[in-house]
Amino acid sequence: MCSHIIVARHIPQGCSSLKEGRWDRKKFMGVELEGKTLAIVGLGRIGREVATRMQAFGMKTIGYDPIVPAEVAAKFNIEFVELSQLWPRADFITVHTPLLPSTTGLLNKEVFQQCKPEVRVINAARGGIIDEDALLEALREGKCAGAALDVFTTEPPTNRELVEHELVVATPHLGASTSEAQVKVAQEIARSFLDAKEGKPLQGVVNPNS
């Protein structure tokens, strides 16, 4: 949610500007989330949770997933659409997929050409899902109004021009960087060891029968 808000309202840029002694209210005119269409690529647990939370801001949620069926999406008030229909409708795009051959460079030059020029993109999933060169080109040419990036193709990122672009909010992979999240991860690992020792089914196993 944080990424959606800050990329909509230019909050980090406004903060930096004020600290440098400027009062640039007109420069940082933002947009509201209410009434905007959020396109969610990847409708697993996280994607569905994002949908539920952003609907509270009055956003319309559409989404795509190659595995999750439309009936499941509908239970979370997500309109299931194919990617070719998703891109032109989106005011905001957020990705929540693993990095696979099929998702590498998923948001590329051709996709940005299909999007609204005021589209804003958020990636807190995996670096490489968004073609960084294509994103930078879209930002330069006015085909993308902003981006919030917490992950990068190479970490630390080497594309400094993208990171330093005035319409980009970039953070150093902070998605799970809270004290509480780290405790939960440790507890889940410990629980998995105990379950394995006791012969119980393990949570999150991709191939439990192998």
Image (cartoon, rainbow, N blue to C red):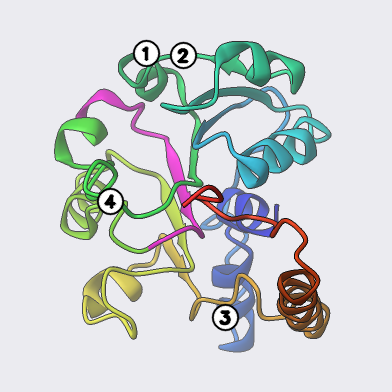
- The part of the chain drawn in magenta is 113-126
- Label annotation for residue 16: 3
Identified by mark 4, the residue type is Leu
* Viewer-side residue, 198 vs 112: 198
Q: CA distance from mark 1 to mark 3?
A: 37 Å
Q: CA distance from mark 2 to mark 4?
A: 26 Å
Q: Residues within 10 Å of mark 2 (few under 14, many from 20)?
A: some
* For residue 96, side relative to residue 176 (left or right): left
Q: Earlier in the sequence, mark 1 or mark 4?
A: 1
> Is residue 117 a member of the stretch shown in magenta?
yes
| Residue at 48% in and 68% down | 150
Residue 42: percent from left, percent from top? 50, 37
Residues at circles 2 and 1 in contact by the CB criterion of under 8 Å: yes
Q: Which residue is mark 4?
A: 139
Q: Earlier in the sequence, mark 1 or mark 3?
A: 3
| Residue at 81% in and 79% down | 187
- Label annotation for residue 85: 1
Identified by mark 2, the residue type is Val
Residue 46: percent from left, percent from top? 65, 47
Identified by mark 3, the residue type is Ser
Q: Earlier in the sequence, mark 4 or mark 3?
A: 3
Q: Nearer the viewer, mark 1 or mark 4?
A: 1
Residue 74: percent from left, percent from top? 69, 14
Q: CA distance from mark 2 to mark 1?
A: 6 Å
Q: Earlier in the sequence, mark 2 or mark 3?
A: 3
Q: Which residue is mark 2?
A: 81
